[in-house]
Image (cartoon, coloured by chain):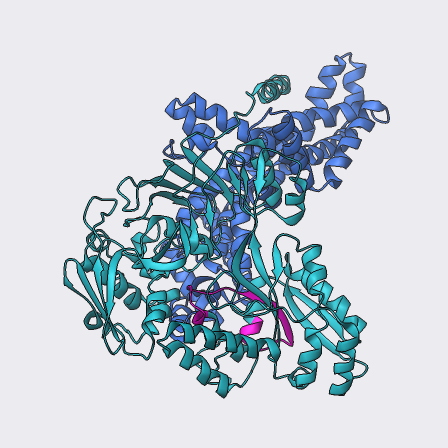
Chain colours: A blue, B cyan
Amino acid sequence: MRVLLLVLRTLGTLALTFFGLLAVTFVIGRVVPIDPVLKIVGDRALPEVYERVRQELGLHLPIWQQFLLYLQKVLAGDFGRSALTGQPVLADIARFFPATVELATAATLLGVLLGVPAGVVAAVHQGRWPDHLVRLLGLVGYSVPVFWLGLMGLVLFYAKLGWVEGPGRLGVAFEDLLEPTTGLLLVDAALAGEWEIFENALGHLILPASVLGYFSLAYISRMTRSFMLAELRQEYVTTARVKGVPEWRVVWRHALGNCMVPLVTVIALSYGSLLEGAVLTETVFAWPGLGRYITDSLFNADMNAVLGGTIVVGCVFIGLNLLSDLLYRLLDPRART
Amino acid sequence: MRIGTGLVVGAAAVALALGARPAAAATPADTFVMAKQIDDIITLDPQESFEFSGNEINANSYERVMNFDATDLVNLKPAAAESYTVSDDGKTITFKIREAKFASGAPVTAEDVAFSLQRGVKMNKSPGFILTQLGWDKDNVDKLVKALDPKTLQITITEDFGAGFVLSTLSANIASVVEKKVVLQHEKDGDLGNGWLKTNYAGSGAFTLRSWKPNESVVLEANPTFWRGAPSIKRVVIRHVPEPATQRLLLEKGDVDMARNLSADQIAGLAGNKDIIVESSPKAEVYYMALNQKDERLRNPKVRQAMRWLVDYHGMTESFLKGRFKVHQAFWPSGFAGSLTDTPFRLDVAKGKALLAEAGYPNGFEVNLDASNSYPSINVAQSVQATMGQAGIKVNIIPGEQKQVITKYRARNHQMVFLYWSPDYVDPHSNADTFTRNPDNSDNAKSKPLAWRNSWEIPELTKKTDAAARERDPEKRLQMYLELQKAVQEDSPFVIMFQAQDQPARRANVKGFVAGPFADQTFYRLVQK
C-alpha cells in the first residue's frame, strides 16, 4: 500500500511538472511576435489560403483552447506535424535526438574520464603547478566561445592536419548506406558489422565531441577539485594516513569515494545540458541535432516542434534525476536504508 | 580500482582518436556534392513547394508545361508540351504533349499534365494563386483544363490575360508534371497524394529524388530516360551546412565540389586559391526600403524624394556588399526581359537636405527602421542610418528576426522597413502585381500586396498594371512594364536599392553548373567533373 502511494505521488509530481513545462513553453511560443502561418504559406499566399492554414493550426482559437487541444492530442500520442520540416514531430525527433545523444555521450565520456582525474590531481597538489595547470585549462574552457574553438579545431585538425573527418555525421560516400535501427551511427554500424562506416562516423564524431567534452571537462574538473579539497581536510583522511594506508588509496579510494555522490549529480546535470542541445557546436559542425532543431523551430514559432522537443528534454532531465537518485543508493550505503 | 580502469579506457579512447585515419579528400567521381543551407525546404511536392531550395530541387527533378533550359535561360519554350496554339480570342491554348517518360517508365500523357494543373488548383497551397489568378477554382478547373486525347491538352482561362502571361505562369514550379497514377495510389483522406509527395517522387525530370532528410541532406540520382538526355553525373548530394565558415572549409578541403552560401569576406579569402573558382551571377531578388504612407512625414513627396538621395548605394556595393549585390533601382530585376536598368540616384546629402527643407523639415526628424538582424539587412540599415543622419534624419534601427519583421510589416505597424522581394514566376507581372497594384487599401483588405502594406493608394497605377497583364502584343506589353517601373522609381514609397548576386564557389574541376537569376533556373544536369 505504501509503495503504491509512493508511486502514485511520484507520477502525480511528474504529470504536474510536465504540465507546467508545456504550459510555460506554449505561452512563450504564442507571445513571440512571429506569425507561424508565414513559414508555411510564405509571405504572398492568397488570404483564403492564409486563413485556411491559420484555422488548420487552430490559431483562431483563444490561447487556452489551443493549449487544451494540444494536450488532448499529445495524450493520444499525436505530437502533430512540424511546420518547418513538413514531417511528423515524432519522426523528426527520432532522427535528431540520436545524433545529439551520440555527441553528448561521447563528450561526457571524455569530460569524465579526463576531468575527474584532473580534478583529483589538482586537489592533491593544491597551490602547485599541476593545480595551476588544471585551473588554467578550466578557465580557458569556461571563457572561450565554443563556436570559435570548434572552427579553430576544424581549421587545424581537419583542414590542415587531416587527422579527423570534416563536418556532418558521415562522409558523402557512405550516405544512405546504413539503415537506421537505433539512430546512433556508431552502434548501427557496429551492429551491421560495417566497420568502414564505423570508422568514418567515429572520425566525424571525434572533433565535435572533443570540443564539447572540453567544456564538460572544465566544469567537472573544477567541481571534482573543490569536492576533493573539502574531503581531504576531513579527519578520516588524517586517520587513514596515520594508520599507514598508502597515499594513493587514501586519495583515490577513500576521499574520491566520498565525492562520488555530489559528483554524480554534477555529471548528470552536465550530460543533461549537453543533451538539451549544443546549438552552436551543432551549427559549426553541421550536426543535425536536437538543439538546432528546437532553436530553428522557435524562430519560426513552430510550436508543435518546440513542444515536442521540450517534452523530450523534460523527460531527459527527469530521467537523469531518477538515475542519479538510484546511483546515490548504490554509492552511499547510508542512502540504502 | 574502478577509477584505474576508467583511466585505461580513457587513454584508449584518446589513442583511438589520435589514430583515426586521415580524412579522405575528394568526392566520388560520379557524384556532385554541394554544401548549401537547405533548411527552408518544408515540402518537395511541386504543387506545394514555395521555397527557394525546394523549388531548385523540383526544377531538377520535374519537367514543367513550359520551361527554360540549362542552355537557354532567356527564351521560354514548351517543355513537357511540345508545341501550342492560341485561339483567336486568346483565351484557349491547346498543347501537344511531348513524347517523354516518367522515371517509373510510364509515358507522360495529357491526362497527367491536366491532373497536375488541376491538383495545383484544388490543393490551393501557397503557390496556388499562380494558377487560380487565371480564373480557375476547384469547381471549374476540371472543365477548363482537360485532356482531349492522350497527347492533347486544352486549357481555357476566364480572367482577362494575354497568352504571353498565361504561358509564363505555366513555367512556374506549380506547373510541374506529376504522374497521376502513382500520386493517386498514395492518396489519403482526399489529399491528392500531398502527404506522400512531400517527401517522395513522381516526376519526369533530369534527376529522381532518392532521399530528403530535413536539415541534413537531399540526394538526387540521374534519370537516364530524361527527354533532353541523361545528365552527365550519376548523383547529386546536397548537404545542409548552416555555417558559411564550415562550407568554406569543406570546399577548400575538397569534401564538397561547391559551396553556395559563402559570405563576401570568405570569398575574398579564397582569392589566391587556384583550386577554387567563384563567379557572380545576378539573382532575381530586389532589396528595397519601404516608407509607410500612414506616417504623415513619409507621405510627403519631397521627403520621399529626399530619402532617395540619402542612401550610399555605391559605397555599399563597393564595400560590404561587394560581389553579393549590385545597384539596381527598379522593381523588375535585370537579366529578364522588360527590366529598367537606369540608376539615377546616388548619395547626395546636400540635395537631400534641400529637399527636406522644402518639405518643411529643415532639421530632419526621428524615424524607426525595421530590419532583419542578419547580413545584409542590418549592415545596410546601419549605412542608411549614417547617411540619413548627415541630413538630420535620426534613424532608430529596430533589428528583429526576419519573420518578426515581416509579421510587423504585414500588419502595417512599421514606419520604415528594409526587405527584399523576389518574383514567383518569370513575368514582370509577378512584381508589378505587388509593387504597383493596390485594389483595396482598407485595413481588412483581402490581399496584402507591398503597395497595401505601405498604405499607398494608387487607383491609376492599379489600372495600368491590369492593362499590362491583359496586353497581347509582347513588345507593347514590355513597354508598359518599363513605364510602371519608371513611375515607382521616380516617386513611390519604395526606395529600391540593390539586386542580389549569387556567388557559388566551386572546385576548379567542376564545369557546367548553371545558375540563372531565378531559383528555378538553377540546373545540375550539365555538371561535369
Is B421 inside the magenta-drawn segment? yes
Q: Residue B370: name its quadrant.
A: bottom right
Residue A112's place in the image compared with B4, above or below, is below
Q: Residue at x 58, y 26 (%)?
A: A164
Q: Residue A286: name its quadrant.
A: top right
* Left or right: B211 in relation to A245: left
Residue B366 picture location, percent across and down: 75, 77
Residue nearest the observer in this picture, B247 or B424: B424
Residue A262 picture location, percent across and down: 67, 35
Q: Residue B83: name its quadrant.
A: bottom left
Is B13 inside the magenta-drawn segment? no
- Residue lying furthest right: A127
Residue A305's place in the image compared with B248, above or below, is below
- Residue lying furthest left: B149
Q: Can you say which quadrant of the picture contains the C terminus of chain B?
A: top left
Q: Can you say which quadrant of the picture contains the N terminus of chain B?
A: top right
Q: Residue at x 76, y 68 (%)?
A: B387
Residue nearest the observer in this picture, A141 or B304: B304
Q: Is residue A332 visible?
A: no
Residue A238's place in the image compared with B474, above or below, is above
Residue A258's place in the image compared with B348, above or below, is above
Q: How many marks?
A: 0
Residue A103 picture location, percent across and down: 55, 35
Q: Residue at x 78, y 73 (%)?
A: B349
Residue B528 picture location, percent across and down: 43, 36
The region drawn magenta spans B408-430
* Left or right: B82 in relation to B133: left
Residue nearest the observer in this picture, B226 or A107: B226
